Amino acid sequence: MRLWICEKRDQAKNIAPLLGNPKPGQGYIDTDDGRVTWARGHLLEQVGPPGYDKAWEAWNFEVLPMIPTAWKHQPTADKQRELAVLLANIPKASEIVIATDCGAEGEAIARELLDHAGYRGPVRRLWYSALDAASLTKAIASLRPGESSEPLYWASQARSRADWLMGMNLSRAYTLRSRAAGGKGPRHVGRVMSPTLALVVRRDAEIAAFREATYYELEITAQTALGANVVLTHAPADAERLFARADAEAILAAATGASGPLAVTHESKAQKPPALMTLSRFQQLASRRFGWSAKKTLDIAQSLYDKELTSYPRTPCMVLPNEQEAEIPRVLETLGQVPGLARHVAALTVHKPTIRPTVFNSAKMAKDNAEHHAIVPTGVPLASRTLSDDEQTAFLLIAQHYLAALMPDYTFNETRMTLEAGGVPFTVTGRVPTGQGWKSVFGTDPDSEDEDDTATPALPDIQDGTRCTVAAAALRPKKTRPPKRYTEGDLIADMLDVGKFATNPEVRKRLKENAGIGTEATRGTIIENLRERGYLEPQGKFIVSTPLARELIAMLPAPITDAATTALWEEKLDEIEGRQGFV
């Protein structure tokens, strides 16, 4: 008997009809191509310290460090029924098809069960990026060898064991240390959780230590002999700001009345559309635009996937395989039925979609060992599913990014004017759009904090080299601003880009292309756990550290809170997934 193991019942209900003549049973569905059964997430979990050694039940320094000699799992509470069905069917199987979610956790859900049941028979893998019938039918016709996805399980186990060793031992150690100093309650330490928390604690400390300072920008009005005026500014970068008023006034005095040739450049430029959705990018945009938590965004992305409307959500990949080009007409046909998108689809129907290597790139997916492509609509009609308002909003954002990726570049003419006066450059830049391209979908750049990111001053028509005189000059006092408090989206962005926090140049260079700390599947959960355990709390749309968090981070040594160190561990775990490392 061929046994198909799904991650949840809804998956089984999607897959079984495609295998022929589905007949429901108790916890399974029989088909022409075997029996389809399902888990309910992880049916097994790692045992706690007492499960290895009774002496480890006591919280004292004498039993530390606790290092299991053989790793054990136990049934997850309240999931006995699903476990019983699977353990009864696995021994009867002549072949197992793993049909769980296609990622490290999905792989672990199935393979933990096979190990627990002692199964040693043949294994195949159903690999899919969406749950619609077309995607599943294609995947069923091209089952993969089981060993193709097994490294995902190895990496999952390595992560799980590293988390157990660090969490169980260090949480106990620092709880005991806190108690000795009069603290109450547990202190939680984690491989990813602690450096994530340290980012927020550090940011809050920087804000608390911030002292406002005045700096100066300079503004001049340059005039041609024919009376044309243009306003230019000297606004140095942060490291070169003018904090001394006397210095700013000296430059201004030297600039007043000065004359010289105005350097004018004209350049036609193009801006490509924003990247397609990854989960982290989706979480960042949803946090900025809608104020959603990372967990809420993941839950909505998962729901859209379960409803077959969008592809697999826990993906770090920003591109699509080249074969997806053939899906464009089918997807556009259904998106054309969505209010607000019809005119953009019509434009793409009239004008051939733009195919870019930044969007369709199988070679990049292969190079990056990407198992899943970017999050995109599947082509299932939106009207065929019942959605909440938030799900509608999320789907629209994903669909907009898909449409934008197929549209022409946004184009504009950029004029830059520069006048040397008082020994410093004064500049102004103007942009005139020449083609809205993909921006017609959004109205603005979705990655911009500025709602009108294309607005620029209208510049007079002055030829390059025209002699100008400074007719007026003024100081423009400005105030330094404290670092911005974290939103959940901002925190995820820094979890992805931890290399910038590395003090060692070699480490910073190495982490430039690194996937940061945590995974697409876990970053939102980590932030949620920190909130639930009292280490982070909301402050409007921002999150801030609590006194408990600051006390804990102050206790922990640098290697535990260093995000760059954790990112290097993640790099090794990624190597295991790619068969380049070992457990």
Image (cartoon, rainbow, N blue to C red):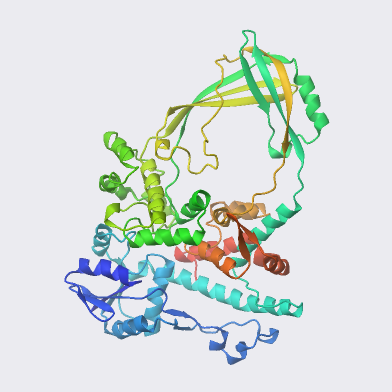
Q: Position of residue 47 (x, y in %)?
A: 51, 83
Q: Residue at x 61, y 82 (%)?
A: 66
Q: Is residue 74 above or below residue 574?
A: below
Q: Is residue 176 above or below residue 265?
A: below
Q: Quadrant of the N terminus?
A: bottom left
Q: Position of residue 491 (x, y in %)?
A: 58, 56
Q: Quadrant of residue 345?
A: top left
Q: Is residue 529 left or right of residue 472?
A: left
Most distant residue in the right direction: 246
Q: How many marks?
A: 0
Q: Is residue 128 left or right of residue 480?
A: left
Q: Position of residue 187 (x, y in %)?
A: 65, 74
Q: Residue at x 70, y 78 (%)?
A: 184
In the image shown, does 575 or 192 lie closer to the viewer? 192
Q: Is residue 414 visible?
A: yes
Q: Quadrant of residue 113?
A: bottom left
Q: Is residue 118 visible?
A: no
Q: Is residue 126 above or below residue 472?
A: below
Most distant residue in the bottom direction: 54
In the image shown, does 457 or 160 lie closer to the viewer? 457
